[in-house]
Image (cartoon, coloured by chain):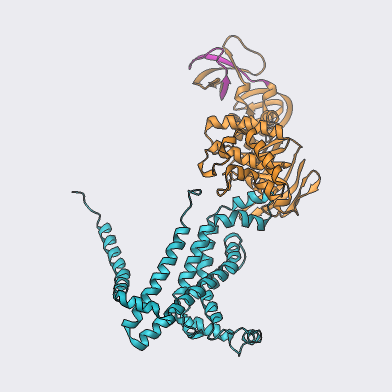
Chain colours: A orange, B cyan
Amino acid sequence: MIEIQNLSGSLGEFCLRNIDLTVQDGEYMVLLGPTGAGKTVLIEYMVGMYRQREGVILVDGEDITPLYTEERNIAYVPQDYALFPNLSVAGNIAYGLEAKRHPKKEITRITEEILDALGIGHLRHRMPLNLSGGEKQRVALGRALATRPKVVLLDEPLSALDENLRAQMSRELRDLQQSSKATFVHVCHNFEEASAVADRIAIMNNGFLVQVGTLEEVKAQPKNEFVARFLKTQNIFPAVADGTKVLVNGIQLEKKSSTRGDMVMAIRPEKLRIHPDNEAGGLNAFRGTIVEAIPRPHFIEYTVDVGLKLTVFQIAEREYRVGDAVTVQVPAEHIALVEKV
Amino acid sequence: MTRKEPFLWVSVSCAIVALTFILLPLVEMLTAPSLAMLGETLKDRAVLRSIWLSIYTAAAAAGISFVIGTPLAYLLARCQFRGKRLVEGIIDLPIVIPHPVVGIAILSVAGRNHWLGQFMSELGIRVMGSVTGIITVLTFVGMPFYVNALKSGIEAISPRLENVSRSLGAPMGSTFLRVTFPLARRSILIGLIMCCARAISEFGAVVVVAYHPMIAPVLIFERFEGYGLKYSQPVAVWLVLVCLTLFLILRVLTLPGKKAA
């Protein structure tokens, strides 16, 4: 288990502030945030590249902050994979085992096992410069896993790959994590990428850790407007809450829980339902007109004007056209009221 | 007919002038002595001794620069510390100081009036008029070229490679030897060539510290002073030919290998 407690540090003008994060054994944690949020810096602190101003990092209860990088047993895969260009694929994978002075026979055995497991046995004599992006990534992962580390830190591992390969490699990363039983911390700025691999996500912004939780938790109840926007919650409006009532642009909605004050209302577009004009009614049902309909690969993205322009993702069970009169149902349990940023 | 850019014409003209400026005197010097004269010169033991001494002392200076300069170059390439610019300036000093001044500066420290000179004298180390003195001078003038070339080479190697190596369990020293050093191989060789080239051409500082034993540039100067241009040219030609051959061999060694390409 990794426990980061009150970690603060500065690098030039950038500051990492009071980070508290716990990653369970064998968990796949994704650090998510926009560019410049401090995700990479956080894993660089974990790997031991810088000394923190305050705070500690514990791995299985042991404070690793006084240890050198090589003593931490934390493998690190940087964004560009950083394969050693002077070593072959097999040489790269065996590197950590040689550095830790494993017996030669064992080095050969483990290297072969990893080459086979990753399906790159045919590349064993190739030099890194002659590998494709996906092959490089496999070699970098193999090199990181060869020494059986407790923790693997991945800095934007899929960013250099094209979209098709990214989906495939996401699955492979997840499988590798489960078979190796190591704790993975994966940095990315892409919500879809995080959804494909993460057990939990930790959202960072401006050097702060903003929210930690499972994808469903964070999507259902974002901590503030920044998280809601970052997770592509498209229906975000200034709102005034008064108990279970929420007033948005003159429209009143009912919510399950009770809150008061000026806030921001966030509703995920996939949680809204469109019904034909005469088929729905009741709580939070609003009549409106379809103003835009964009077909997406697995759903249609509608914009419905109900006095607010609501975005609705709906599977094409029934298709509506621009100008159709419809009713939009807003489920009370999916209305999130969050802090303004 | 395609129009030519006037700037291109100016550039080409300047390039021709520059190349002529470099090549004309060298070609003139290389072609001046007859083959018979060159053959005769090669039988002269003093000439052979001086060329060998030049090569040997320059190689020794490069060796010393390699041992002392490699960690220094690594430090400058990888570490940020207060006073780094000052250290870099100090390393560049031998490049800008007039050569006889270098000789005088070394004698000021290595002479009997200085505690270091006295201490060295007690150890039996003589700098004035000795091979040790020549190597000292050549290291002084050649090392900045090695350090600067290697520093640039190490800076071009991604520090991420070193970070990854350490995260895989290799300590800093082992990381340097297994990752940085092999990747900086070309820069090391280029630095050594530059250090050697600078050392082998040194005259002004050596002539102050050690006129004897004579390195080739000092012998050429002596022949010129004593017998004139005609007698100094063949020695100069042999020195140029030997140096060119050595540097060509080293240059071939520094070409990027197929693996890295």
Q: Quadrant of residue A259?
A: top right
Residue A213: tell me if it is visible.
no
Residue name at image x 44 percent, y 66 percent:
B246
Give the x, y percent position of residue A281: 64, 12
Residue A149: tell me if it is visible.
yes
- The stretch of residues the image draws in magenta is A308-331
B61 or A5: nearer the viewer: B61
Up/down of A212 relative to A314, above or below: below
- Is B154 included in the stretch rendered in magenta? no
Count the marks: how many?
Answer: 0
Give the x, y percent position of residue A57: 75, 48
In the rendered image, the residue lying farthest to the bottom is B113
- Is A322 included in the stretch rendered in magenta? yes
In the rendered image, the residue lying farthest to the top is A278
Up/down of B48 relative to A26, above or below: below
Rendered-image quadrant of the N terminus of chain A: top right
Q: Is residue A282 left or right of residue A299?
A: right
Up/down of A273 relative to B90, above or below: above
Residue name at image x 34 percent, y 78 percent:
B233
Q: Is residue A186 left or right of residue B240?
A: right
Q: Quadrant of residue B175?
A: bottom right
Give the x, y percent position of residue A241: 69, 29
Rendered-image quadrant of the C terminus of chain A: top right
